[in-house]
Image: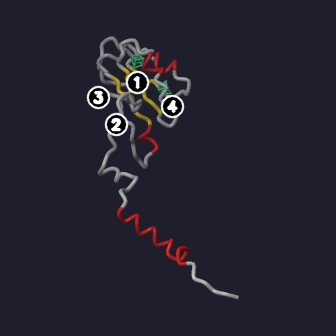
Amino acid sequence: MEWSIDLQGTLSPLKILNAFWQKPNTIAYPTVKKASVSGYRGFHTNVLKDCIGCANCQDICMNDAIDMIHIDEEFNTKNTSKCIPRIDYGRCCWCSLCTDVCPPDSLKLAEECISVSKYASDFLYMPKDK
Ligand code: SF4
Ligand code: SF4
């Protein structure tokens, strides 16, 4: 039986050292933030001085992601229900139907889309003016 050294096979694990000179494929979030993409459907914003509390956004949401929450502060005298929408980002699929049916066009989707939190309650979000 004849023995031979598989030099290529023996040295191939050392190819990993090439990684030292490669650029990383990830970003160091949160110190580095990814640039937003124009037109991206991110988090909701709501211009509260225009919101009339009509709950159209809640009615259209197929995922039951919107609850109308009563507020004490008066932002708009036309908001007779004194309620504004709260979004559950555990349910939202960013279809944007709620923004389509908003009569005063106060509810919109911003391009910002990254949220990191260890608290589940932070994903119940009351959109405000941007
Ligand atoms: S974007 Fe779609 S799923 Fe999300 S809250 Fe609006 S209607 Fe509901
Ligand atoms: S955000 Fe728009 S659709 Fe929703 S309650 Fe306010 S005015 Fe009505």
- As drawn, the label of residue 87 is none
- Out of 79 and 118, give the one closest to the viewer: 118
Side of 95 where 111 appears, left or right: left
Give the Cα distance between marks 3 and 1: 21 Å
User: How much space separates mark 3 and mark 4, taking CA atoms?
Assistant: 21 Å
Residue at left offset 32%, top offset 21%: 48
- Mark 3 and mark 4 lie on one chain; the one further toward the N terminus is 4
Q: Say what amino acid the circle numbered 4 marks.
A: Cys
Residue position for label 1: 70
Classify mark 2: helix, strand or loop. Answer: loop
Identify residue type, mark 3.
Answer: Lys
Q: CA distance from mark 2 to mark 4?
A: 18 Å
Instruction: Tell us which disc is closer to us: 2 or 1.
Output: 2
Q: Which residue is mark 2?
A: 36
Mark 4 and mark 1: Cα distance apart in space: 24 Å
Asked which secondary structure carries label 3, the reply is loop
Residue that lies at the very extreme toward the front in this rendered image: 2
Residue in view at x 40 percent, y 46 percent: 116
Read off the residue under disc 3: 130
How packed is label 4: few (under 14 Cα within 10 Å), some, or many (20 or more)?
few
